[in-house]
Image (spheres, coloured by chain):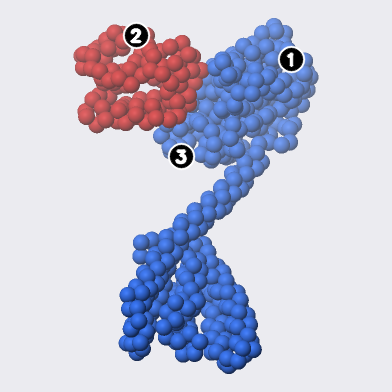
Amino acid sequence: MSFPEIDSPSFKEAELRSEWTRVAALLAAFAGLFFVVVIRGALSLAVGWRGEAWPFAILLAVMTVYELARLRRVRQAITLHLAASRTRWAFNVFVESLFPTVALLLQIQTPSFGPDRALTSPVVLAWLLFLILSTLHLDPALSRFAGVCSAVEYAAVALWIFARYPETTSVAPFVVYGTAISYTAILVLSGFAAGAVAGQIRQHVLAALHDAENRAKITQFEHDLGMARSIQQGLLPSVTPCLPGFEVAGWNQPADETGGDYYDWQQLADGRVSVTVADVTGHGIGSALIMSACRAYARAGLAMDPDVHKLLNHLNPLLFHDLPAEKFVTFVAALVDPQYGVAQMISAGHGPLLFYSAADDRFLCYEAQGPPLGLLPRFAYTGPVTFKFDVGDILVLLTDGFIEFANAADEEFGIQRVQDVIRASRGKEPAEIISGLRAAVLQFAAGARQLDDLTALVVKKTAPASI
Amino acid sequence: LHIRDNSGVSVIDISGRLTLGDVPTILRDEIRRLIDEGNRRILLNLSGLTYMDSSGMGLLVAAYATMSREGGQLKLCCLTSRIKDLLLITKLYTVLEIYEDEPAALGSFAVAAH
């Protein structure tokens, strides 16, 4: 066979369905032929010939019963997901090719035809009908086999007629032999032509199935991604923390379905609140997985011991062992004490860390205490920086997605524009400051694609300390 | 990406953009090859590097860490202001061995050898 066996269950099913169509089409053709035979029988009765058509009607009935049985077997195979057996199908092709042979033999016995005209009678065309429909086997080899069977049987009947009825070749032997040879050749060639058509149909069916499978995979993939996204978004804090005198807001928008950025806050047992922003290398699903590991370590660590310095020195080797080489996390955590309005902040390679002082109307830019997490497992981070919030002061923790958001001219949003927006919205609530930043960066980008995740967390002191 | 030998130090000139994609892969393979060939002094000349994303940064640090583990030295020189800012923000500037220009970097290798 020139085509490889296709093992996919969907192709096997398509093959069976096609076979079902083929048998159904044959049955429809039989019904039409039956009608023709009955009309011819009735007409022949009218002109005084008796019984010429009836053997054909009986043969058609036998064929119909055979094909009905086959239709049932194919239907069962489809329902039970059975595979088509090549040998059995080939045997069926052979059995079907015998029907026109029997009809031809009956034709010889028909008085109005006789042996000399039988070899060119319409019965021969029945083989072509089978050959045309054999394309629905979707198997070039089976179609060619059908062509060879038809030709061999036709040739055998012809030889038998020439031997049995020598008078058929006595008048014009050249014409008679030539006709028989041509018919035989046409049957073989038709088989091969049908094989070529079957091959084409097979290719199209395979391509269509391939497309359908791909679409199904994509749907599954999109579903999984959507699920990952909703899980990741669910990891972001939803309830604002209890931080008297302060307001806190966060926002995250991944560049893809999922991202490597996150922000978090956590109410600690001593009344302080930790706020965190982190950025995992890259974005997408891989970074999202790392992000959730990092977040889990950080939350568990801070709950056990609310010391950001120890936290970094623990997180770093843990992440180093978890992360693939070259992947890292920039991480900033600040512990805000509402009682004294003081914050302790530590950063592992994360910047910019902007602090807007309302009294001086100026920005302080804090530096990181060491490199990003997960790169150098033995690095010892220095202690956190401590600063005091006065009313109106704003801490803004961003990821570089904001700073590096580029417009069509490849110009970046940059830290200056961030500061301008914060200064302009210094009187507003943190959530409004963030939406201002978001609007400004989108306006600046003017439709340029977001290439990196965007995350912002803003802490603002809104009222004097509670003591 | 161009590799040359300057007074016993393998100097790799990196230019263009070091972002997620082919360049980091080639650079990683080249550094790996140099280390496998027994090369223990590598200098990355970044004078032509205009942009680097976090995956490029990860690559540099991982190469540095690998080299340190193998007992060798990997240094950087000739940073553009943009790359310098990036390394300053992430504090990698203080971790990695960085020199203003190539002679200074080569000189540091020589001093270490004595």
Q: Which of A66 and A33 is in front in this view?
A: A33
Tell me which chain appears blue.
A
Q: Helix, strand, or loop for circle 3?
A: helix
Tell if the residue under mark 3 belongs to the same chain as the one under mark 2.
no
Distance, label 3 to label 2, CA atoms, is 36 Å
Disc with the residue nearer the chain's start (3 vs 1):
3
Q: Which of A255 and B110 is in front in this view?
A: A255
Distance, label 3 to label 1, CA atoms, is 40 Å
How packed mark 2 is, by other alpha carbons closer than 10 Å (few <14, some 14-19, many 20 or more), is some
Chain containing the residue with disc 1 = A
Chain containing the residue with disc 2 = B
Report the amino acid beneath label 2.
Asp
Label drawn at residue B101: 2
User: Which residue is denoted by mark 1 in the rendering?
Assistant: A426
Q: Helix, strand, or loop for circle 1?
A: loop
Residue A97, image quadrant? bottom left
Q: Can the viewer see residue A180?
A: yes
How packed mark 3 is, by other alpha carbons closer than 10 Å (few <14, some 14-19, many 20 or more), is some
Residue B15 locus on image (x, y percent): 38, 17
For the residues carrying marks 3 and 2, which lies nearer the camera in this image? 2
Q: Helix, strand, or loop for circle 2?
A: loop
Q: Colour of chain B?
A: red
Task: Please give the count of numbered marks on the rendered protein.
Answer: 3
Q: Which residue lies furthest to the top in this view?
A: A360
User: Residue visible at 72% across and 20% down?
Assistant: A436
Report the amino acid beneath label 3.
Asp
